[in-house]
Amino acid sequence: MPRLSEVIAALDNLWPAERAESWDAVGTVVGDPDQEVTRVLFAVDPVQEIVDEAVKLDADLLVTHHPLYLRGTTSVAATHFKGRVVHTLIKNDIALHVAHTNADTADPGVSDALAGALDLRVVRPLVPDPTDPEGRRGLGRICELDHPLTLADFAARAAERLPATAQGIRVAGDTRATIRTVAVSGGSGDSLFDQVRAAGVDAFLTSDLRHHPASEAVLHSPLALLDAAHWATEWPWCELAAAQLDEISDSHGWDLRVHVSKTVTDPWTSHSPSPGAPN
């Protein structure tokens, strides 16, 4: 069985830490480099529910997309929920590794997985990485549909293909409009409106769209918007990442058992539509 340091080295080749944003907190949070790894769990959020799942699974390594301590801390006391996460991990010899913005811009990365879940053909990055001579890495993806759909039908596809959440898919735009090209960005994407408009796509699917940027986007262009739950747009990456590690395990003869958590950790748990609201 491989040591944790060997598995982490393989993960770092997929998502080099130096490609993370300067504000980000990626890499190994908890874990002994010399411990053996036999079972790995992938998830979006390093919350207690996921850590408890890792314990029940008898996992040695938990890999999450979101950091545990993004802004740093001076304490890991178990009086706080993040401290309890750390205590649970250490008590059960479970390592925690984070791949966040370095996985967002990877090739393939978070937005490739999102495009794949929606059965879209990736054409190029939305915001190319200037350090990539091949122009394949970068934030978000410009995609094409296999055949044109109305906005209503494309929204229905997204609702069907992405993990179910209380939010579902919010839509802005004429639901009868024809959609041929789509920009996608896993996670919060309303900082990318300038690049989306410049790309000339018919629709933009992302999450966490705020009122004013969304309003300006639809008032000043024919761009359609699809706003999914943040967790739902990033969960497909877990399956992609697990498949990548499976392939590495097979090539190295590690025989790792790799799992993907299906636990919904989106914070919104229910939805009550307004009476008379549009469908």
Image (tube, rainbow, N blue to C red):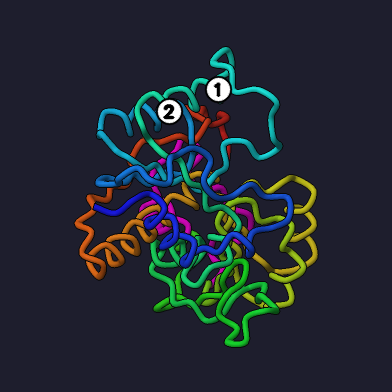
Residue located 74% across and 77% down the image: 198
Residue located 62% across and 67% down the image: 139
In the drawing, does residue 180 fall left or right of residue 194?
A: left
x and y percentages locating residue 129 in the rendered image: 66, 75
Q: Is residue 153 visible?
A: no
Q: Quadrant of residue 8?
A: bottom left
Mark 2 or mark 1: which is in front? 2
Q: Residues within 10 Å of mark 2 (few under 14, many from 20)?
A: some
The kind of residue tagged 1 is: Gly
Residue 93 versus residue 196 in the image, above or below: above
**Residue 143 is one of the magenta-drawn residues:** no
x and y percentages locating residue 65 in the rendered image: 50, 48
Please name the residue that numbered disc 2 is placed on: 90
Q: CA distance from mark 2 to mark 1?
A: 11 Å
In the drawing, does residue 210 fall left or right of residue 182?
A: right
Q: Is residue 73 visible?
A: yes
Q: Look at the numbered disc 2 and give the secondary structure of its residue.
A: helix
Q: Nearer the viewer, residue 195 or 87?
A: 87
Please name the residue that numbered disc 1 is placed on: 83
The kind of residue tagged 2 is: Ile
Look at the image and give the residue range highlighted in magenta: 155-178
